[in-house]
């Protein structure tokens, strides 16, 4: 199958990672794949680093002048599928798709779906929609009742084998330091847990605009010996496997969550908030625990319940890895997407 992916964000994001991971998987399985993106964008560089043929264009009004040239290039490639991952790339795909090609729109955006005359027109000309979580799927179906909508959560590669849990009470979080990721609530939870859990360590890995500001807050909060901020870790799997419990404490967004899937693949129970895709990934009470966003006390209670019962935590971690393997591995991701592509192509012949 000839497939073109279009993702024109100028920054790294969960949507971008979803798109390039899928494209690389398809190429590795014998499909002919091109990745189209914005000039000098991180996702285009990532796609090229993975060995994918890439094509750059200039998003926005300046890019419309390129449409005649892009139409010629897309026709020469002769794709069966154009998979757009953003609103603007969806518009471009509809303008340049050759006859006989199916347009698929993947939506992994936390912003609400808007039903306007333009988006309804686009939906009528789109053979299939892919939603990255159930909330997005419901929004698309509500806004465009005639649309074909399929749920395809992101899949990721995991470590070859699980590793025993560490003996100490080590809680980990891997996320960029951004207000939406909820580090402040995890710090408040650590203050609650510190007198109740001897030798507690909370390790928050990642980079971002808030890192240094939060680092300076640790001593005034009395957390300088409890909370560690190592920055970007050289090997994420070593970090994840060195923790007993994972936390994803976001206050919003999380249309896709690479970090949550990584905790599952590592065989660690995850304490997560009820936002975005996280309730789709975490089976509450089975593979982890869900807590309300912005509630440090509830977060502390969930973490403590797992620290107090290592056998329960270990069983949850094992079930989390099994759930990842069955539903969120690269194989599952690839196969679910190809099913959508097949249905989209079938719809053209009806």
Image: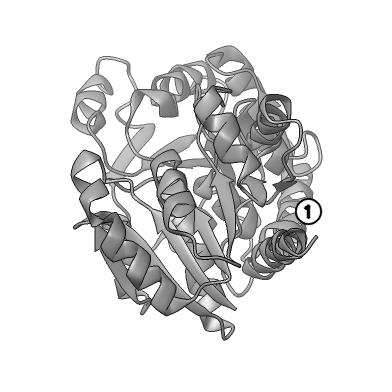
Residue 157 in sight in this render = no
Q: Residue furthest bottom?
A: 30
Who is closer to the viewer here, 95 or 277?
Answer: 95
The residue depicted at 72 percent of the width and 25 percent of the height is 142
- Note whether 48 is above or below 321 in the view shown: below
- Note whether 251 is above or below 174 in the view shown: above
Query: How far from the left and from the top, in percent, is residue 162?
Result: 64, 66
Picture quadrant of residue 270: top right
Q: In which quarter of the image is the C terminus?
A: bottom right
The residue depicted at 28 percent of the width and 45 percent of the height is 11
Who is closer to the viewer here, 242 or 127?
Answer: 127
Instruction: Using residue 200 as the reference point, say whether residue 292 is left or right of it.
Output: right
Query: How far from the left and from the top, in percent, is residue 233?
Result: 32, 55
Q: In which quarter of the image is the N terminus?
A: bottom right
Who is closer to the viewer here, 337 or 232?
Answer: 337
Query: How far from the left and from the top, in percent, is residue 316?
Result: 76, 47
Picture quadrant of residue 218: top left
In the structure shown, which secondary structural element does the residue marked by tag 1 occupy?
A: helix
* Residue underneath mark 1: 319
Circle 1 packing at 10 Å, graded few (<14), some (14-19), many (20+), is many
The residue depicted at 61 percent of the width and 59 percent of the height is 155
Query: How far from the left and from the top, in percent, is residue 231?
Result: 27, 46
Image colouring: one colour
Who is closer to the viewer here, 18 or 131?
Answer: 131
Instruction: Using residue 307 as the reference point, say whether residue 107 is left or right of it.
Output: left
Instruction: Using residue 61 as the reference point, say whether residue 35 is left or right of it.
Output: right
């Amino acid at each position: 199958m000839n497939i073109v992916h279009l993702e024109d964000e100028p920054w790294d994001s969960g949507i971008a990672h979803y798109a390039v991971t899928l494209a690389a998987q398809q190429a590795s399985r014998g499909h002919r794949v091109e990745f189209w993106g914005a000039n000098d964008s991180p996702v285009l560089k990532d796609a090229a680093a993975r060995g994918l043929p890439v094509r750059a264009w200039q998003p926005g009004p300046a890019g419309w002048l390129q449409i005649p040239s892009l139409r010629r290039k897309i026709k020469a490639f002769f794709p069966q599928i154009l998979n757009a991952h953003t609103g603007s790339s969806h518009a471009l795909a509809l303008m340049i798709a050759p006859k006989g090609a199916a347009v698929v729109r993947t939506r992994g955006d936390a912003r609400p779906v808007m039903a306007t005359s333009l988006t309804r027109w686009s939906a009528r000309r789109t053979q299939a929609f892919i939603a990255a979580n159930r909330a997005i799927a419901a929004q698309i179906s509500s806004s465009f009742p005639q649309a074909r909508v399929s749920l395809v959560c992101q899949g990721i590669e995991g470590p070859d084998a699980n590793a025993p849990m560490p003996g100490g009470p080590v809680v980990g979080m891997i996320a960029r330091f951004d207000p939406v990721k909820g580090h402040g609530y995890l710090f408040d939870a650590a203050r609650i847990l510190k007198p109740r859990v001897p030798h507690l360590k909370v390790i928050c890995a990642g980079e971002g605009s808030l890192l240094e500001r939060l680092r300076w807050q640790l001593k005034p909060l009395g957390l300088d010996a409890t909370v560690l901020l190592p920055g970007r870790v050289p090997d994420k799997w070593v970090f994840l496997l060195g923790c007993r419990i994972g936390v994803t404490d976001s206050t919003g967004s999380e249309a896709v969550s690479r970090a949550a899937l990584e905790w599952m693949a590592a065989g660690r129970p995850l304490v997560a908030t009820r936002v975005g895709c996280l309730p789709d990934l975490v089976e509450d009470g089975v593979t982890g625990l869900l807590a309300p966003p912005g509630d440090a006390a509830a977060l502390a209670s969930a973490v403590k319940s797992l620290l107090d019962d290592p056998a329960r935590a270990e069983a949850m971690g094992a079930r989390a890895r099994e759930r990842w393997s069955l539903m969120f591995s690269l194989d599952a991701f690839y196969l679910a997407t190809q099913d959508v592509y097949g249905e989209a192509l079938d719809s053209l012949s009806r």
